[in-house]
Image (cartoon, grey):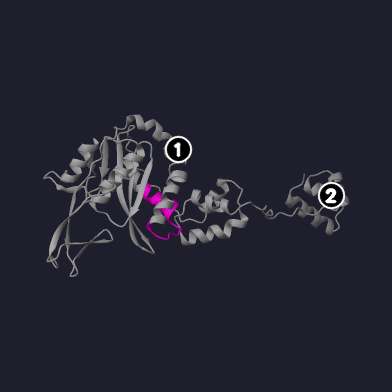
């Protein structure tokens, strides 16, 4: 078969009026080949881009581009869930390839992973979020081996929130890990000894002794020591919080609970290759049993009494005896329904 260039030269020779025998000799081909191309009226082949075939993703591309323009960190699995609810029946790979070309490239950082055994560790952290009804704080607790995630939003980052949240997380896990890793949050760490090691406050030490775990703090400026919960914060932002609307704190936590059960703890985890809630079933036998009676903390807070005889705590106002207006008092805060929270 003649190449594209040979056909162009052949047609040029024929237009010049050269005999077929001479053309065949010049091109080094058989005379019958020249005759066949001449009789068939062959034109030189036309090479151009192939027309693109329609894709199942085409009707949703404009929606996807709008979403990542507004929320650049939305995950592929979150976007897949959204367009499936709109009627998309295609696969994840085509979506992933399309989104890859529309996201900024980020350099890959290689870090050494700290491996843990079942029941060995949980990691704890706070994350801040802005909502139409004010700033809220997510307390995250993740079991390092199974990657099971517990989260709750609230308006405070105080000690009562941390202790109550840990109790709720342990109840959800149906057991207590042997160590709990914190950053240097004030609600857990009172300071450092001369060697730089963390000194935990008395309330946290009593709490940890009651539940049977050892509190551990990250070294200063080494937040990546608790990389599992740091990545969980990023995952919470991208896959849950971005692009949703919430009426109030109760609605936020209601949607969160559904997402934890149906998505976060039900997906195949990218690192372990297993489903966290199924992996938790294996980890539970390695967790420390929950104590029979829950720990009830007594947290003391400084509050100033208003002129009309009230003190404010956690969004509520409480009356005080007459004669104490404008004075500062210590408020003892204990969660009333603490032992029922799960």
Residue 260's x, y, as percent? Answer: 42, 46
Considering depth in this image, is 203 or 71 the residue closer to the camera?
203
Quarter of the image where one finds residue 14:
bottom right
Q: Earlier in the sequence, mark 2 or mark 1?
A: 2
**Residue 1 coordinates in the image, percent (x, y):** 77, 44
Secondary structure predominantly adopted by residues drawn in magenta: helix
Residue reaching furthest to the front? 322
Mark sitting on residue 37 = 2
* Magenta stretch holds residue 55: no
269 or 29: which is nearer to us? 269
Q: Position of residue 204 (x, y in %)?
A: 20, 44
Q: Quadrant of residue 73?
A: bottom left
Question: Which labelled disc corresponds to residue 98?
Answer: none
Proximity of marks 2 and 1: CB atoms separated by less than 8 Å:
no
- Between label 2 and label 1, give the one nearer the viewer: 1
Disc 2 from disc 1: Cα separation: 64 Å
Horizontal side of 138 relative to 55 (left or right) equals left
**Mark 2 surroundings: few (<14), some (14-19) or many (≥20) residues within 10 A:** some
Q: What residue appears at the point 34 percent right and 36 percent down from the top-left corner?
A: 174
Which element is circle 2 on? helix
292 left or right, relative to 73: left
Quadrant of the snapshot with the C terminus = top left
Q: Residue placed at 79% from the left, 49% from the top?
A: 26
The stretch in magenta equals: 232-249
Residue 244 is covered by the magenta coloring: yes
Visible residue check, residue 262: yes
- Residue 280, percent across and down? 39, 35
Please name the residue that numbered disc 1 is placed on: 275
């Amino acid at each position: 078969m003649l190449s594209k260039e040979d056909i162009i030269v052949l047609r040029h020779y024929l237009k010049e009026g050269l005999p077929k025998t001479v053309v065949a000799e010049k091109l080094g081909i058989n005379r019958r080949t020249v005759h066949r191309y001449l009789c068939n009226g062959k034109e030189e082949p036309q090479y151009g881009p192939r027309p693109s075939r329609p894709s199942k993703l085409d009707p949703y591309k404009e929606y996807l581009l709008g979403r990542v323009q507004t929320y650049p960190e939305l995950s592929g699995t979150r976007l897949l869930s959204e367009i499936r609810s709109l009627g998309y029946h295609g696969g994840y790979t085509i979506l992933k390839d399309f989104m890859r070309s529309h996201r900024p490239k980020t350099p890959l950082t290689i870090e050494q992973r700290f491996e843990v055994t079942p029941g060995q560790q949980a990691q704890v952290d706070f994350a801040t979020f802005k909502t139409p009804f004010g700033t809220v704080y997510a307390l995250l607790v993740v079991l390092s081996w199974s990657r099971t995630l517990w989260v709750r939003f609230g308006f405070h980052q105080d000690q009562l929130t941390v202790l109550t949240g840990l109790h709720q997380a342990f109840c959800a896990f149906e057991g207590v890990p042997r160590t709990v890793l914190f950053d240097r949050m004030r609600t857990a760490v009172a300071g450092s000894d001369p060697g730089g090691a963390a000194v935990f406050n008395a309330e946290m030490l009593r709490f940890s002794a009651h539940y049977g775990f050892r509190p551990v703090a990250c070294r200063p400026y080494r937040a990546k020591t608790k990389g599992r919960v740091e990545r969980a914060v990023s995952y919470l932002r991208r896959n849950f919080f971005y692009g949703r609307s919430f009426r109030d704190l109760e609605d936020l936590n209601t949607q969160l609970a559904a997402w934890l059960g149906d998505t976060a703890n039900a997906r195949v985890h990218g690192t372990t290759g297993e489903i966290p809630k199924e992996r938790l079933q294996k980890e539970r036998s390695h967790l420390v049993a929950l104590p029979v009676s829950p720990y009830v903390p007594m947290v003391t807070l400084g509050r100033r009494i208003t002129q009309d005889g009230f003190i404010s705590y956690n969004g509520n106002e409480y009356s005080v005896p007459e004669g104490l207006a404008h004075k500062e008092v210590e408020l003892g805060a204990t969660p009333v329904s603490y032992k029922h929270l799960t």
